[in-house]
Image: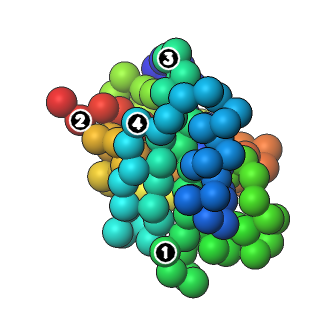
Amino acid sequence: MFKKVEHIGIAVKSLKDSNHLFEKLFGKEHYKIEAVESEGVNTAFFQLGETKIELLEATKDDSPISKFIEKKGEGIHHIAYEVEDIEAEISRLKEEGFTVLNDKPKKGADNKLVAFLHPKSTQGVLVEICQEIN
Ligand code: ZN
């Protein structure tokens, strides 16, 4: 079951510049900066009520974020939905015909297990599903 929009991921060229901009926009500071080595990204998180905004900056040229920015420029990169049982959702979504990019959930930023759906199967929007690690 999908529970809520957990966060929206925004691809940025410079985390430093964008943190400054989003701090001005929201009137509050990010609550964490975290590197996700496996994805080649640095992330910053802002809490807005129940939802978060995740800024993503590439740390290497072959990072998915570098490729995204090359193709589309800075902007919304993915929408992340919190799910109750990520393993069950991966099976369910595959059965429903979605292209799930991860057979097994992997460790993402912000203490989460995550999996992604190919944007081709979700109307052009990269979908992340995530579950808090207890
Ligand atoms: Zn995310």
Q: Is residue 94 above or below residue 39?
A: above
Of the 4 image quadrants, the one containing the C terminus is: top left
Q: Quadrant of residue 118?
A: bottom right
Amino acid type, residue under disc 2 in the picture: Ile
Of labels 1 and 2, the one closer to you: 1
Q: Earlier in the sequence, mark 4 or mark 3?
A: 4
Q: Which residue is mark 3?
A: 50
Gap between marks 4 and 3 measured at Cα: 14 Å
Q: Earlier in the sequence, mark 3 or mark 2?
A: 3
Gap between marks 2 and 4 measured at Cα: 18 Å
Q: Are marks 1 and 4 in contact (CB under 8 Å)?
A: no
Q: Which residue is mark 1?
A: 59
Residue at horizontal 54 percent and vertical 43 percent from the top: 54
Of labels 1 and 4, the one closer to you: 4
Q: Are marks 4 and 3 in contact (CB under 8 Å)?
A: no
Q: Nearer the viewer, residue 31 or 65?
A: 31
User: How many other residues sit within 10 Å of disc 4, few (<14), some (14-19) or many (≥20)?
Assistant: few
Q: Which residue is mark 2?
A: 133
Q: Earlier in the sequence, mark 1 or mark 4?
A: 4
Gap between marks 3 and 2 measured at Cα: 17 Å
User: How many other residues sit within 10 Å of disc 1, few (<14), some (14-19) or many (≥20)?
Assistant: some
Q: Earlier in the sequence, mark 1 or mark 2?
A: 1
Q: Is residue 96 above or below residue 75?
A: above
Q: Secondary structure at mark 2?
A: loop
Q: Earlier in the sequence, mark 2 or mark 4?
A: 4
Gap between marks 1 and 4 measured at Cα: 20 Å
Q: Quadrant of residue 48?
A: top right
Q: Which residue is mark 4?
A: 31
Amino acid type, residue under disc 4 in the picture: Tyr
